[in-house]
Image (cartoon, rainbow, N blue to C red):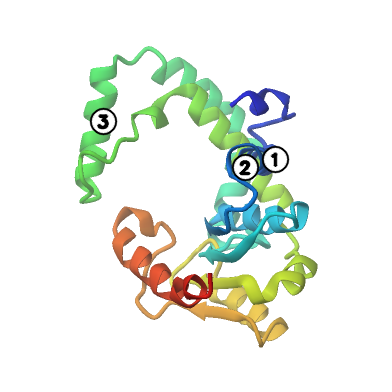
Amino acid sequence: DSNAQEINDIYGLQGQVEHKLAFLRTHVPKEVKLVVIGHSIGCHFNLEILKLAPELPIIRSFLLFPTIERMSESPNGRIATPLLCWLRYALYVFAYLLLKPWPEKIKSFVIRIALRMMNLQSEFSVLSVLEPFCLANAAYLGGQEMMKVVKRDNDTIKTYLPKLTFYYGTIDAWCPTKYYEDIKKDFPEGDIRLCEKKIPHAFILRFPQEMADMVADWLKDDLSKI
């Protein structure tokens, strides 16, 4: 995308938001109504897009397992923050010294073993994850998430509340149920749901179809009005 070259710090948090906005403004016709679905940090992107581009015809925004506040204070955040913010340079050195020389066959073998241990399908292609450049960018973005996603954007939520559906997990160490209880208290009239099926934060690994069916069902009313 030629627009990507014009975005400062494209692998950072704000750069990722601007990249999504550039794509929507450049490639999506203005008359096309949009449904935006975000997962985890993607929910932060959702709210930023609504705030920065009110002209986009977004009819519904789904925020699944939303990491939109207090990331570094969450159970996982307390572990990830020192690793991503202070020790990520050690990860860079490890990635370049150890992983860079690995042949593709060895990387594929390691990934197949890991996927088998997690009971995942072998076609779940994540070979690029073991590339040092990819690891470095992921760690950089993760560090920014820990430092910058702190306070919930209540102003944007209040403005667009009728368009928002939140879905929180009960076993989510990135956004614990306390966060659900807090936002439910602040926005009692909002469509803020708590999972009753013990679906984990990383639902894409084992529950993609179940989540897709749920979101499709929630969306029926909105689509019927178009």
- The disc, 3 or 1, on the residue closer to the chain's N-terminal end is 1
Q: CA distance from mark 3 to mark 1?
A: 35 Å
Does residue 8 appear to the left or right of 74 in the view shown? Answer: right
Query: Are discs 3 and 1 less than 8 Å apart at CB?
Result: no
C-alpha separation, residue under disc 3 versus residue under disc 2: 32 Å
First of labels 3, 2 by sequence position? 2
What type is the residue that disc 1 sits on?
Answer: Glu
Q: Residues within 10 Å of mark 3 (few under 14, many from 20)?
A: some
Q: Amino acid at mark 2?
A: Lys
Label 1 SS = helix
How far apart marks 2 and 1 lie (CA) works out to 5 Å
Q: Position of residue 143 (x, y in %)?
A: 64, 42
Three-letter amino acid code at the position of disc 3: Val
Q: Which residue is mark 1?
A: 18
Where disc 2 sits, the SS reads helix
Q: Which mark is residue 110?
A: 3
Which quadrant holds residue 214?
bottom left
Which residue occupies 58% across, 64% down? 61
Horizontal and vertical percent position of residue 34: 57, 57
Residue drawn at point x = 20 percent, y = 39 percent: 122
- Who is closer to the viewer here, 42 or 67? 42
Q: Position of residue 192 (x, y in %)?
A: 57, 79
Quadrant holding the N terminus: top right
Q: Residue at x 25, y 26 (%)?
A: 108
Label 2: few (<14), some (14–19) or many (≥20) C-alpha neighbours in 10 Å: some
Is residue 170 something that shows in the picture? no
Residue that numbered label 2 is attached to:
20
